[in-house]
Amino acid sequence: MATRIVVGHLPAAMQPASEASMRRSLLSVCLLVSQSLAVAPGSTSAQAAPARTAIQIATAVAAGPATVGQNATVLAWPEDGGKAFTVLRPGSNEWFCLADDPSWPGNDAACGDPAWLTWYRAYLTKTAPPGSTGLGVGYMLTLDTQVSNTDPFAAESAPGNQWHKPTPHVMLLMPDQLLAQSRRRRVRERHT
């Protein structure tokens, strides 16, 4: 069974007061973390690793609501073409937050539930995600890069690939069966 991705923009009440205020808040967190973990001149890159990790964690958890990110497992994209995410911080809930992919322009950090983690693992290995019978919920509240809704590997806009503008949004993974039921229900409602 295939799974479809549905992207919906956040209602105005759930969006940050402004994109600028959201970016200032995220930048403030990153600056505070980097200043508190600043590396002295002449220190080794191993000493710089905690600062880099702290910044990755801060930007990853900012991609979702605070109630999701505060206890989520935080993951980083693999280095050197690896096929497994690196755990930056273990979590205590079922959610994960994925740090920005350094190989992609802009910030594409995301948070999601187990269904989305399965999707991201399939994306990483360029394989089809297994079919799902449940709904998956994900967040990209700090997205500032454009992506395709129909081709996750597309590097630029092309006719028919539903290019998505960078705005804070909630993502839903919907199994084909659930999507079909929803469509049938909408058709019935229109004709009654």
Image (cartoon, helix red, strand yellow):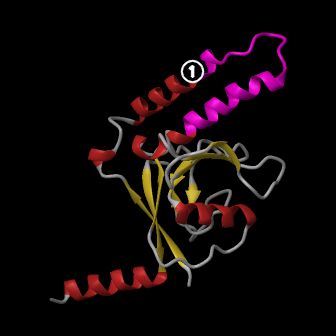
Q: Position of residue 144 (x, y in %)?
A: 53, 43
* Amino acid bearing label 1: Leu
| Quarter occupied by the N terminus | bottom right
**Where on the picture, by quarter, is residue 88?**
top right
Give the crowd class for mark 1: few <14, some 14-19, many >=20 residues within 10 Å: some
Q: Is residue 39 magenta?
A: yes
Q: Nearer the viewer, residue 59 or 74?
A: 74
Q: Which residue is depicted at the point 49% across and 39% down?
A: 62
Q: Is residue 4 above or below residue 49?
A: below
Q: Which residue is depicted at the point 61% across and 65% down?
A: 118
Q: Is residue 157 above or below residue 93?
A: below
Q: Which residue is mark 1?
A: 31
Q: Nearer the viewer, residue 17 or 154?
A: 17
Q: Nearer the viewer, residue 92 or 68?
A: 92
Left/right placement of residue 20 relative to residue 185 reads: right
Residue stretch in magenta: 33-59
